[in-house]
Image (tube, rainbow, N blue to C red):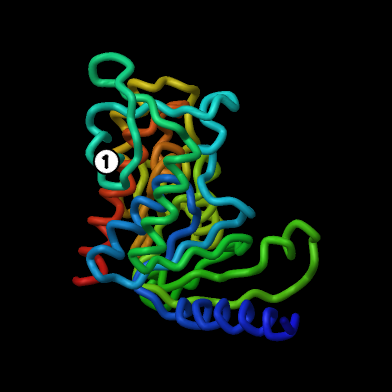
Amino acid sequence: MDEVIISRAITESFMKDFLDSLNIDVAIAGAGPSGLVAAYYLAKKGLKVSVFERHLKVGGGMPGGGMMFNRIVVQEEGKSIMKEFGIGLKKYRKGLYVADSLETIGAMCARCIREGVKIFNLITVEDVVIREDDRISGVVLNWSAVGWSKLHVDPLAAKSKVVIDATGHDAEIARIVEKKIGAKLFTEDGKVKGERSMWAEVGEKALLENTKEIYPGLITCGMVANAVFGSPRMGAIFGGMLLSGKKAAQIAEKKCKA
């Protein structure tokens, strides 16, 4: 078998998907659990969705479970989403279930791809596109290796109707927007407040409330939501993360169809 044919097959198929992702409905930065859940529900509604993940693997912190014990906890409220993805759950006590973190993220990734979501790993969202109406209208992309190597290589851009920040604790896209436009986010002081120390009960309750549009065209998702609004982190309990992803998808769908 000719190695060049193998190389062409890889390059041509990848570039077809990449070129098709330069004009999309929703761009999601981060392929952690909340970002994948959001992508899945948006794709099920027929929207064109691409997810850009900085790292080699998808899943964010989920594969490591709690302190590298590859198990996660999900509350009763998140059970239906886990079941929809076909993920096995074991009841631990009333209202709490344990799942294998690797099965969970693997199932989420597979279902997203089968629904038509395009997932690009090793690509970083390093900036956003903002036009005259001050609305975010796309993302600026570069190979992650460019940043890691500190090379001066210009990026490319993709157009989208909505951007979802699912970059986790660092809230990278929200911070980029704050830096570019100043204190204009839809928070008390217009800035990213930063997450507080771990408090699972309070953090889980706050997460859905904090999942919202924080600037025209930019929606928080998952741990970003609590980081932006200054709520606690939750640890290895993921019901809120799943529900946040679903809510972010609902908000994004409405914005795309407005």
On the question of residue 62 being in view, the answer is yes
Residue 102's x, y, as percent? 50, 39
Residue 230 location, quadrant? top left
> Residue 189: in sight, yes or no?
no
In what quadrant of the picture does the N terminus appear? bottom right
Q: 73 or 231: which is nearer to us?
A: 73
Q: Is residue 205 left or right of residue 145?
A: left
Q: Amino acid at mark 1?
A: Lys
Name the residue beneath numbered marker 1.
Answer: 83
**Residue 185 at what x, y percent from top left?**
40, 52
On the rendered structure, is 138 left or right of 56?
Answer: left
Depth check, front residue: 16 or 209: 16
Residue 137 vertical placement versus 242 (above, below): below
How crowded pointer 1 is (Cα within 10 Å; few <14, some 14-19, many 20+) is rated as few
Camera-side residue of 227 and 3: 3
Residue drawn at x 52%, y 25% is 66
Q: Quadrant of residue 206?
A: top left
Which residue corresponds to the image point at 46% horizontal and 76% vertical from the top-left? 21
**The quarter of the displayed image where residue 67 is located:** top right
Which x, y percent locates residue 94? 24, 15
- In-image side of 36 versus 125 (left or right): left
Badge 1 element: helix
Q: Is residue 7 above or below residue 36?
A: below
The residue shown at (31%, 44%) is 86
Q: Position of residue 70 (x, y in %)?
A: 53, 29
